[in-house]
Image (tube, rainbow, N blue to C red):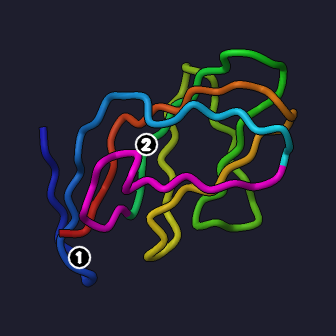
Amino acid sequence: MTYHRISARGRHLFVPYNGKIADITHADTNKHTLDLAAALGETRTIIAVILNVARIAGTGDFRVYPNEGAKFLYIEMWNQSDFVVIASNSQRLQYNQTVANDDFDLYCLGYVVET
């Protein structure tokens, strides 16, 4: 099912997606970014994503930063999907892991683009 919304900024389109977009393992707990346009193969401007994460190995948590802000959002392990707003014109998701060398698989359940 496709949803359309008309707003002052223009037309938005929800794109259903059900797949893994990244395997994330870093040797640090610093913030990193994921290029969503490349990960999703999307040419339109992505403004939000619905995410889910699976911990493959480790004990820490996976955090994302909506709008690349200072406040983070924990993405629950498989029992919850979170809607994350992307920083304007960035096409990227900012994230970190709380324990170095943990391994996470990041899944997208859908995203919103400007048309």
Give the mark, 2 or 1, whose residue is nearer the N terminus: 1
Amino acid found under the numbered disc labelled 1: Ser
The residues colored magenta run 30-46
Q: Residue 39, relative to residue 24: is it above or below? A: below
Disc 2 secondary structure class:
strand
Residue 76: x percent and y percent? 63, 29
- Is residue 40 found inside the magenta-colored segment of the image? yes
How packed mark 1 is, by other alpha carbons closer than 10 Å (few <14, some 14-19, many 20 or more), is few
Which residue is at a point 57% across and 26% down the rendered structure image? Answer: 105
Place residue 97 in its image quadrant: top right
Residue 88: x percent and y percent? 47, 75
Image side of residue 45 versus residue 52, left or right: left
How packed mark 2 is, by other alpha carbons closer than 10 Å (few <14, some 14-19, many 20 or more), is some
Seen as rendered, the residue at the extreme top is: 57
Residue 19: x percent and y percent? 36, 28
Which residue is at a point 87% across and 33% down the rendered structure image? Answer: 99
Image side of residue 27 versus residue 37, left or right: right
Q: Residue 17, relative to residue 91: is it above or below? A: above
- Is residue 21 found inside the magenta-colored segment of the image? no
What residue would you read off at disc 1?
Answer: 7
Disc 1 secondary structure class:
strand
**Quadrant containing the N terminus in the rendered view:** top left
Q: Residue 35, relative to residue 115: is it above or below? A: above
What residue would you read off at disc 2?
Answer: 50
